[in-house]
């Protein structure tokens, strides 16, 4: 890692496109939207703020793949159903890039202010994933070369921006991680065949401009 303006879109209801359960959400992402997913590592049941992986200093507890590894991410319904039948509370991890969206993330408070500024400007955004500490704006897949050229052309890029591209990952709603619950700040529209997402250039340009204009300090998290 470095994944519609106006009123906030209504979250999916508990019927129809309901994704209140991880298995339902995982199947929607994998089969309807063709986003490769896999289960994340569970939190330590004795220490809910600690990751269940072997690393005692894990910086993204519960929000990363472990067993299976990231390369196992799939859109196969049978595999997804088997995973979440056996691990019903496992976080849903999106393998970013390729057929799936990538993401640009930043700390929650600057992100909220930046989105407000982008709404005032009429900037169209797709889904936005939120944890208590960071928000991630989903964007179209991009290459590392494309991202490198984009950042090189900038006079200033906040150090707190992170990029989830090819070979990266992102926890999706309704996952529970060590940082807290993962939710939609901007939810996909109900019944979406596959959510629309903007290009990374437009998002980076707009976010950097919004942070600069609002004078937001974006510390590292």
Image (tube, helix red, strand yellow):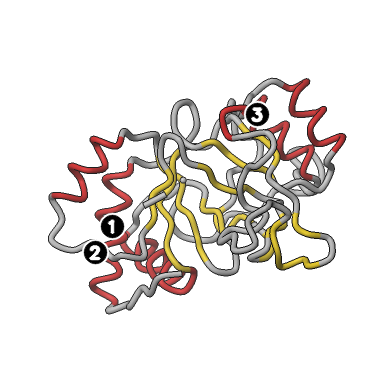
Mark 3 or 2, closer to the camera: 3
Q: Position of residue 211 (x, y in %)?
A: 30, 70
Tell me how far mark 3 sits from mark 2, CA to CA. Answer: 34 Å
Q: Position of residue 10 (x, y in %)?
A: 64, 55
Q: Give residue 139's quadrant in the image.
A: top left
Tell me how far mark 2 sits from mark 1, CA to CA. Answer: 5 Å
Q: Secondary structure at mark 1?
A: helix
Residue most extreme to the right: 86
Is 205 displayed left or right of 167 in the figure?
A: left
Residue at coordinates 22% horizontally, 43% vertically from top-left? 148
Name the residue beneath numbered marker 1: 206
Question: Would you place residue 82 above or below residue 114 in this image?
Answer: above
Tell me how far mark 1 sits from mark 3, CA to CA. Answer: 30 Å
Name the residue beneath numbered marker 3: 30
Q: Secondary structure at mark 3?
A: helix
Q: Secondary structure at mark 2?
A: helix
Q: Position of residue 122 (x, y in %)?
A: 34, 57
Which circle marks residue 209 in the picture?
A: 2
Q: Earlier in the sequence, mark 3 or mark 2?
A: 3
Q: Are marks 2 and 1 in contact (CB under 8 Å)?
A: yes
Residue at coordinates 40% horizontally, 40% vertically from top-left? 165
Question: Would you place residue 39 above or below residue 214 in this image?
Answer: above
Q: Give residue 36's quadrant in the image.
A: top right
Alpha-carbon neighbours of circle 2 within 10 Å: few (<14), some, or many (≥20)? some
Question: Would you place residue 147 above or below residue 5 in this image?
Answer: above
Residue at coordinates 78% horizontally, 59% vertically from top-left? 44
Q: Position of residue 125 (x, y in %)?
A: 42, 50
Q: Earlier in the sequence, mark 1 or mark 3?
A: 3
């Amino acid at each position: 890692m470095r994944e519609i303006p106006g009123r906030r879109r209504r979250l999916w209801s508990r019927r129809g496109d309901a994704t209140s359960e991880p298995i339902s959400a995982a199947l929607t992402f994998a089969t309807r939207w063709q986003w490769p997913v896999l289960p994340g590592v569970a939190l330590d049941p004795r220490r809910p703020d600690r990751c269940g992986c072997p690393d005692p200093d894990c910086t993204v507890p519960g929000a990363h793949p472990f067993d299976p590894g990231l390369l196992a991410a799939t859109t196969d319904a049978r595999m997804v159903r088997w995973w979440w039948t056996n691990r019903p509370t496992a976080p849903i991890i999106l393998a970013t890039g390729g057929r799936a969206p990538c993401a640009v993330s930043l700390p929650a408070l600057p992100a909220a202010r930046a989105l407000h500024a982008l709404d005032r400007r009429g900037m169209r955004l797709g889904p936005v994933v939120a944890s208590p500490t960071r928000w991630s704006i989903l964007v179209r897949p991009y290459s590392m070369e494309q991202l490198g050229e984009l950042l090189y052309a900038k006079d200033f890029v906040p150090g707190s921006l992170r990029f989830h591209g090819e070979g990266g990952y992102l926890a999706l709603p309704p996952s529970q991680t060590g940082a807290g619950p993962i939710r939609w700040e901007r939810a996909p529209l109900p019944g979406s065949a596959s959510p629309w997402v903007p290009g990374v250039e437009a998002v980076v340009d707009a976010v950097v401009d919004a942070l600069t204009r609002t004078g937001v300090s974006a510390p590292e998290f």
